[in-house]
Amino acid sequence: MLIVVDHNSGVPVFRQIIEQVRFHVASGLLMPGDELPSTRGLSQELGVNPMTVSKAYSLLEQNGLVERRPGLPLVVRSRTADAVEGERLTHLRVALEPARRVARQLGISPTEAASAFRALLEATSPTEDDK
Amino acid sequence: MTDYLRLADVSKRFGQKTALDNVSLAVGEPSILGLVGKNGSGKTTLLRHIVGLYLPTSGACTTFGRATAELGARELARIGMLHQHDTLIGWMKAEQLLNYVASFYRVWDRELERQLVAMLEIVPSERVLTMSPGNRQKLALVIATCHHPSLLLLDEPLSDLDPIVRRDVVETLLDRFRSDEMAIVISSHLLDDVERIADRIVCLDKGRVVADAPLDDLKERYEEWTVTSPSGTLPAHFAEPYVVAQESDRTRARLTVKDPALHRATFSATYDGEVEQHPLNLEQLFRVLTGATTTRRAEESLV
């Protein structure tokens, strides 16, 4: 599982882990039934304190994203299509927040900003297909 | 529950100088505690109290539930300590010194010793005296860990190491922590490295504990806000008590804010401006906690 943490960004590492697991679930990289690495394994891989990983895992479990089974690895729970859809939009909104701020600061109208975003999406999609 | 260490209202005075001022601190469960503070803030003095090398002028200090003045072989065998200025025997070769130290312990893990010596690239036939400070520090770490201590006290264990080796040492410590149930107390001014491994931070300033909290909580307790107000209506000085440091020129302000989640909504209701929230890393937190963040006036330029 591809998780990358930045130790000195100021964002607590457990939050970075949670965000990335959520993102992978939203993107479909992690599917229902997929197993997460063990606490020890992930803490070794990331070079972080195991307490940090177990804190992230507990919160993911509390939020209903993963399921704990005695003696077995955590697995991703199945979710409704609506929940997945909502999650995907949430990630996009978070990513767009800085853009919203710039638009406000520069006095760019919502229509202009939306068309700029649309143009970017359309311009980059062919290169995405090329991959 | 194992009580690893406990200081209750400990003060330590050397003549006129107060090195520790009413310090209370307890470690009751496995944890990696990062002890941070400026030079002379009392980190070394605190660590030396835990093993009974210093006794408190007032207050009580216990380790594994026993007063540190009365620690015996049983307790001391469960402690590993790396001193800031190494106390290794200079004329011995690395392997001789390891054998010598091992002979004092009932349990000494030769396999772990072999692994660490190989990983940290210690040359067994090299004399301690001719080793670089970094290599001596690595050897001191091996000496402090191969008896599988329950309590590992490290006073600036990374200071003489280059960044690559620091990473290896940090990995080694995490690995030990994953394998053995133990508490580690690590003092360091290398905050990036402490931030990587510590789950709890104790910050000393002038012999006092100015912060003692899980690192994650500490990170969420403060935030930096960049506020932009196109209308230029920001105050030149924010009087809100939760603003702990600031610089403002009315159209832009950079604020360090305590308990940001509590105050975000009120702030936006009060001021006309876009707020950009940034988390603080340990180095920035350290400045806030030790009062190194100054409040700059409006006339000074914003960078």
Image (tube, rainbow, N blue to C red):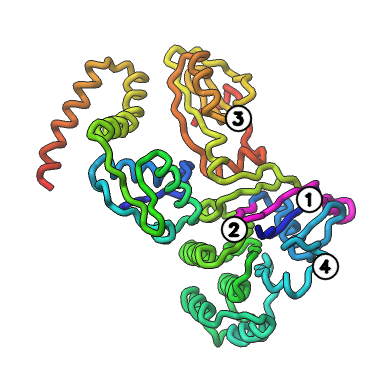
**SS at mark 1 in the image:** strand
Measured in 3D between alpha carbons, the distance from the residue under mark 4 to the one under mark 3, in whole angstroms, is 46 Å
User: Callout 3: residue from which chain?
Assistant: B
Alpha-carbon distance for marks 1 and 3?
Answer: 32 Å
- Judging by the rendered image, the residue that carries numbered circle 4 is B70
Q: Residues within 10 Å of mark 2 (few under 14, many from 20)?
A: some
Nearest-to-viewer mark from 2 and 3: 2
Residue B282 lies, with reference to residue B143, above or below; the image says above
Q: Which residue is mark 1?
A: B8
Q: Nearer the N terminus, badge 4 or badge 1?
A: 1
Residue under circle 2?
B30
Q: Are marks 2 and 3 on the same chain?
A: yes
At label 2, which amino acid type do we have? Pro
Three-letter amino acid code at the position of disc 3: Ala
Judge whether residue B17 is colored magenta.
yes
Horizontal placement of A101 versus B78: left or right?
A: left
Spot occupied by residue A104 in the image (x, y as percentages of width and height): 35, 19
Earlier sequence position, callout 1 versus callout 2: 1
Residue B245's tag is: 3
Q: Residue at x 86, y 52 (%)?
A: B58
Which of discs 1 and 3 lies nearer the camera? The answer is 1
The residue type indicated by label 4 comes to: Glu
Q: Chain of mark 1?
A: B
3D distance between C-alphas at marks 4 and 2: 23 Å
Residue under disc 4 on the same chain as residue under disc 2: yes
Magenta residues? B10-35
